[in-house]
Image (cartoon, rainbow, N blue to C red):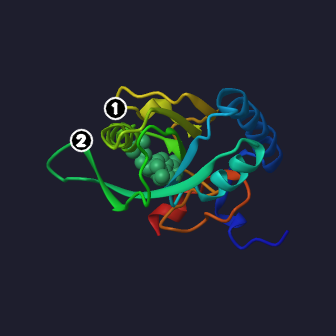
Amino acid sequence: MNSEMEKDILKVLVTEEELRQRIGELGEELYQRFEGKNPLFLGVLKGSFIFMADLVRTAQVKSDVEFIAVSSYQNATVSSGRVQITHDLQQDITDRHVIIVEDILDSGNTLAFLKNYLLTKGAKDITIVTLLDKPARRTKAITADLAGFVVPDEFVVGYGLDYCQQYRNMPYIGVLKPEVYSN
Ligand code: IMP
Ligand code: MG
């Protein structure tokens, strides 16, 4: 396949085949947990959009999908990350089993905030599914219920994850070359 992004990649961390295989397992696990429960898959935009599309097709459970968009930023003088909702839920989630679908669990700020937010909106229970888990950088006491792959403390892109909004459309997870950042 031609790709003008490939030259920016230092190494491949998770191949297309590994993604396909693992997401099949996650889907099967979700089926076992949620068969007959009509869960709501909630994708966190934008990073989760490709994972979400594949996951809901491997989890063949009656369900519906919803998206929420958040932006996290660091206040220069405060070390804790703050999270803002930039696109909110479009439906009532009272008493729903909510499955949060996230691209990567890093510091934990995003998911700690979202979990709390969804509980205040009346969710019955919350299950966190993250494609990638980067435990080295965790500052919040939060863990995923299901994680696809544990990754080292390196900045990764592809399969939905971006650097400056780019590389989301690469079909695998890779590490960017350092010179890409310094440009
Ligand atoms: P948090 O630090 O756990 O709140 O993660 C916030 C967001 O940062 C994630 O949802 C990703 O969108 C982004 N992020 C964290 N680490 C990486 C990475 O290695 N590559 C791309 N995006 C990342
Ligand atoms: Mg994200």
Q: Which residue is mark 2?
A: 80
Q: Which residue is mark 1?
A: 139
Residue found at the very far left of the displayed protein: 77
- Tag 2: residue type? Ser
Nearest the camera: 43 or 46?
Answer: 43
x and y percentages locating residue 145 in the rendered image = 55, 28
**In this picture, is 82 found above or below 180?**
above
Seen at 76% across and 33% down, the residue is: 28
Give neighbour class at mark 1: few <14, some 14-19, many 20+ (Cα, 10 Å): few
Nearest the camera: 29 or 78?
Answer: 29
- Label pair 2/1, CB-CB below 8 angstroms: yes
Horizontal relation, residue 63 to residue 178: left or right: right
**In this picture, is 10 found above or below 26?**
below
Q: Is residue 41 visible?
A: yes
Horizontal relation, residue 70 to residue 7: left or right: left
x and y percentages locating residue 170 in the rendered image = 69, 62
